[in-house]
Amino acid sequence: MAIGGGTFTSQNKALPGAYINFISASRADAALSDRGSAAMALELDWGPEGEVFTVYAEDFMKNARSIFGYGAADDRMKGLCDLFMNIRVGHFYRLNGGAKASCSYGTAKYSGTRGNDLKIAIRVNGDDGQKFDVITVLDGAEADKQTVAAAADLMDNDYIVFKKDATLSATAGVSLTGGTNAQNVQQSDYEGFLDKIESESFNTLGCMSNVDAVKELFVQFTKRMREEVGVKFQTVLYQKAADYEGVISVENAVTDGAAESLVYWVTGLQAGCPVNKSCLNAVYDGAFSVDTGYTQAELSKNLKAGKFMLHKVGDKVRVLGDVNTFVSVSADKSADFSDNQVIRVLDQIGNDIAVLFNERYLGQVPNDAAGRISLWNDIVRHHRQLSDVRAIEEFTSDSIVVEQGNTKKSVVVSDRITPVSAMAQLYMTVVVE
């Protein structure tokens, strides 16, 4: 008869032998999460309807035409180019639907006026007279080519859903017609976007609407998500005094496009700004002409009012101050909360620790002394990374206290941090002898 052996849960074995458990050392993810994610709802001539679609920066540069209808170099993509200058990924939602363009051979993949610029050309194949070359043409350029014997063999592409029962015959080009954009986007369309985007993860939410009711909708959504749901992000609006650290109000208009077009660039700038950096003095390197016609007195007044402004310094346009709309300073909320660099640090901590707890501790780790020490260790490790990149200063492990809450299931964490801010003013006294 063999001696005892195997694994154990408790030390209650009757037979002599070696009972050995093999477990992995704890590898909790206490790393700093990446920034560079933005979300926007837009009126477009092309693209999916009623859903959030995700585009990475490298895909935008290569595939903007099939995703948004126009190449990245097209003037109609100036805003999105500004956005993608500083983000790694964007989550988008098309506000306006419409009708799809079509012809006898196929229907545009998406609704919108851009479908009217599509053509389908058909010619007899040069090598096999029984087959046809079916060419999808956009703006006079070939976008897709397939060689088939019949329409039933055609594969739908990025632009056309082919009619498989069509009879193919040679033609120089049949235009798709009837594509339209839905007019008069309503507040309910923005509400649909916010419902969909709530489940996504992003650093900055941008809104291009200049309608105050829509802007207020975004303010309230931001407050609810930050305060009630615990999801930390900032929202960029055009000329909206929200008096809230989660909302950034762009004051400058542009002179060669929709007045609020600078929202694209600021949304990307804020999303892509590292946790240990500031947007203060950043150079505007986008495609629009920015109205910087403000006096020094106006700049000072607007900055104090929580307006995110750009101003001209020499031949460059720069960010005047990395501020949000919070201005109601109190004993509970100091002026530090108006500094977006501070908010980025606080949001980084809020999002990272929430993910850490939900993935590693929630329902898995006992709420005893050892479990709380493990949580304390992970939070300390996370904060030391913030300290190493100079996002916070004067941090010690004593700054974190983890205790049992009022119930056996709850844990209370006390966390004291000092965010670092970038240099903004130089006061220098020179003594001449």
Image: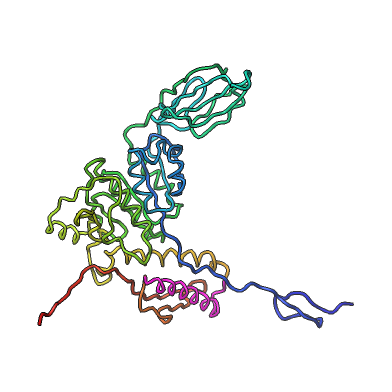
For the point 29% across and 50% down, the residue is: 237
Q: In the drawing, does residue 245 fall left or right of residue 172?
A: left
For the point 84% across and 79% down, the residue is: 3
**Residue reaching furthest to the right:** 1
Q: Quadrant of the C terminus?
A: bottom left
Q: Quadrant of the N terminus?
A: bottom right
Q: Say above or below: 135 vs 67.
A: above
Q: Say above or below: 157 vs 265.
A: above
Query: Count the marks: how many?
Result: 0
* Residue 252 painted magenta: no
- The spot of residue 179 in percent (x, y) is 41, 27
Q: In the drawing, does residue 398 fall left or right of residue 155?
A: left
Q: In the drawing, does residue 280 fall left or right of residue 137?
A: left
**Residue reaching furthest to the left:** 433
- Write down the quadrant of residue 41 in the picture: top left
Q: Say above or below: 75 vs 232.
A: above
- The spot of residue 236 in percent (x, y) is 31, 52
Out of 171 and 185, give the one closest to the viewer.
171
* Residue 384 painted magenta: yes
Q: In the drawing, does residue 16 fall left or right of residue 346?
A: right
- The spot of residue 80 in percent (x, y) is 36, 45
| Stretch of the chain drawn in magenta | 365-390
Out of 418 and 245, give the one closest to the viewer.
418
- Write down the quadrant of residue 257 in the picture: top left
For the point 75% across and 78% down, the residue is: 19
Which is the main secondary structure of the residues drawn in magenta? helix
- The spot of residue 57 in percent (x, y) is 43, 49
Out of 269 and 283, give the one closest to the viewer.
283
| Colour setting | rainbow
